Amino acid sequence: MQESVGVRAVLERNFGYAWAAGIAMAVATVVFAAVAELPIRDPDNFVPGYIRFPAIVFGAIALDVLPRLVWRLTHGSRGAVETLRGIMRERWTKAHWLFALSGIGAWYLTYAAFRNLKSFVPFVNGHNWDAEFRKIDQVLWFGHDPAVLMHDLFGTGIASHVFSGVYFIWIALVPVSIAIALVWTRSRTASSWYVTAVAFDWLLGAAVYLMLPSVGPVYTTAQRGQFDALDHTYNTDLANSMWDDRVAVVGDVFGSGTLQTIAAFPSLHTGIMVTICVFAQYVGLARWIRVVSWVFLGLTIVATLYLGWHYFVDVLGGVALGSVTVWLAALATGNHDGLRPRLKRAEVTDEVTSTPVA
């Protein structure tokens, strides 16, 4: 099938707008760093992102290729090396290598810039909106505190571990979902749509963080004591570590050697899960995937409130952000019918080869 080679078509199918978001964020990072005299850092001290994210992608490639290799070798194929080469020729054409590498590059640029912009928040905008957000929560919950209600409902023992687990699963979910989009999905339009939507999540999330800074209930003097009764979990250690980093960065931004990563409004845990759920609906993923996604979104919302990471208004902001970014990314990547998001299935081509496991 003859494909358009226009500039717009190239941008739509090859993460052009995700790259644009990343470049805009990188420029903003450099400008804020220069004006406010702040350092720009690698966002991952333990395992650098430029190692971790490609490792996830190459791990996903191995999971894509190795089961096919085993299946063919056990069903009559001879010669592991030649069989492997055949699978790689089928599954990993030059076009798909370029596509996947471009996607991971755009993803990492937006992610790294986002982490630095988030760290700049206390230095760029000194106002704190926690008191206002807490008042909004009390209005929305008829004078009650959502975290206290959830502690009363679920208890503060086993539930602490369950919701801590949900929180940590989310941390792994985002890079894994990007790897799935770049490795297993053989539709350029679908992959570009999803990766671009997540890039837009980072972009808009960072912008709102800078405009409306807050730290969340677990870090405020007025509410911190509400979470003392929760069992000690990995979440407890993470919250303490993040606060230590914030204190160190605010006290000595250059000498701290790290980034501060506390910003509550909007909840990007909620936002990106909404992006995943809405995207799954639009592209028609398997019913079980859609159901699991929506259930995990619900668990994520409860976990962020229960553990004190976010106010309820943060959740509402995340829902709005995650929905808008799917729509904006649909327009940016050509996946729309007028103003309505719609996957352009007709543009799935054999340029990115799709083959059965066999």
Image (tube, rainbow, N blue to C red):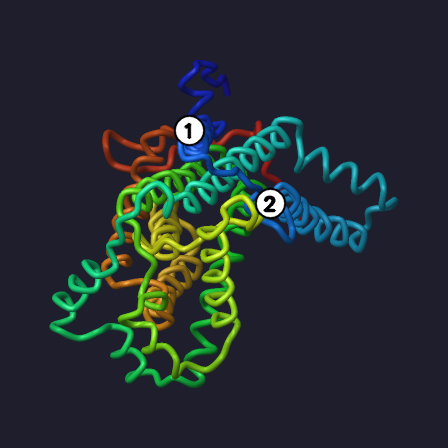
Q: Secondary structure under badge 1?
A: helix
Q: Is residue 326 left or right of residue 353?
A: left
Tell me where residue 327 sits by quadrant: top left
According to the image, label 2 marks what residue? 49
Tag 1: amino acid: Val
Q: Earlier in the sequence, mark 2 or mark 1?
A: 1
Real-space Cα separation, disc 2 to disc 1, in angstroms: 22 Å
| Circle 2 crowding by C-alpha within 10 Å: few under 14, some 14–19, many from 20 | some
What residue is at 25 percent from the left and 59 percent from the top?
A: 130
Kindly identify the residue that appears in the image at 49 percent across and 33 percent down: 188
Residue 347 visible in the shown view: no
What residue is rendered at 39% in x and 30% in y? 333
* Left or right: 206 as drawn, with respect to 95: left
In the displayed structure, 233 sits above or below 63; it is below
Residue 125 seen from this side: yes
Give me the disc on residue 299. none
Image position of 246 with respect to 4: above or below: below
Q: Position of residue 3 (x, y in %)?
A: 48, 18
Q: Which mark is residue 31?
A: 1
Residue at the outermost right position: 79
Q: Of helix, strand and loop, which one carries label 2?
A: helix
Which-is-in-front pick, marks 2 and 1? 1
